[in-house]
Amino acid sequence: MTSNIETVLFAEQEIACRVRELGQQISRDYDGLRPALVCVLQGAVVFAADLMRAISVPFTVDFMAVSSYGEGTASSGVVRIIKDLDESVQGRHVIVVEDIVDSGRTLEYLLRVLRQRNPESLKVCALLDKPECRVVEVAADYVGFHAPDAFLVGYGLDYAQEYRGLPYLGALKPRQ
Ligand code: PRP
């Protein structure tokens, strides 16, 4: 275990198992609909890569990058688009794939932006949810795990761009 990690919260196998279940659930719900997955860079990329391989119905995937966090562990509250989608989502069954919903600001902003583009439907699949940390009211339709109020890293999640490659999700030690 990396020395800055206090505890492993979700182990590699546990994540793999839950991601497979989410993929199966989405495959059942979207049978015949060819959903448009919208992966939110950078954090969701590891989750999206595994989720895609667990979905058995045809789908498309596109990427969007937004940023609300700087180098620290607290949200600045300011959301902006850094990279927009390449394809239109008008008339599509959109599933936003996020790694974590924390204050909800990022997701609320994304959903507002995407809703204006007239998708046929708009849902959210988030690996982690911290409902106790919500500042704005927003909910994910598919949730992998209910996460505790700790700063999580690994499996795509970073601290100052580090730790994204850890195969598990861990809580970072409080800063000394
Ligand atoms: C993280 C995460 C979510 C957002 C959740 O993104 O990927 O998009 O924060 O927090 P919120 O619910 O409080 O808005 P971040 O801005 O850290 O960028 P990253 O995905 O590149 O790590």
Image (cartoon, rainbow, N blue to C red):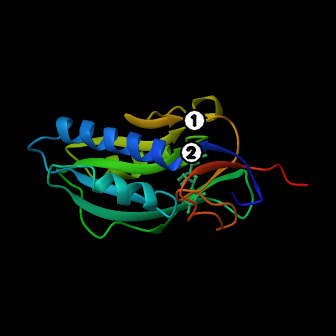
- Residue 76 visible in rendering: yes
Decide if ligand 1 comes within 8 Å of the CB at mark 2. yes
Residue type of the residue flagged with mark 2:
Arg
The answer to whether mark 2 and mark 1 are in CB contact below 8 A is yes
Mark 1 falls on what kind of element? loop
Residue type of the residue flagged with mark 1:
Val
According to the image, label 2 marks what residue?
Answer: 105
According to the image, label 1 marks what residue?
Answer: 136
Horizontally, residue 136 falls left or right of residue 81, namely right
Q: Position of residue 175 (x, y in %)?
A: 85, 54
Q: Position of residue 45 (x, y in %)?
A: 44, 62
Residue 89 occupies quadrant: bottom left
- Of callouts 2 and 1, the N-terminal one: 2
Q: Quadrant of ligand 1?
A: bottom right
Of the 4 image quadrants, the one containing the C terminus is bottom right
Of the 4 image quadrants, the one containing the N terminus is bottom right
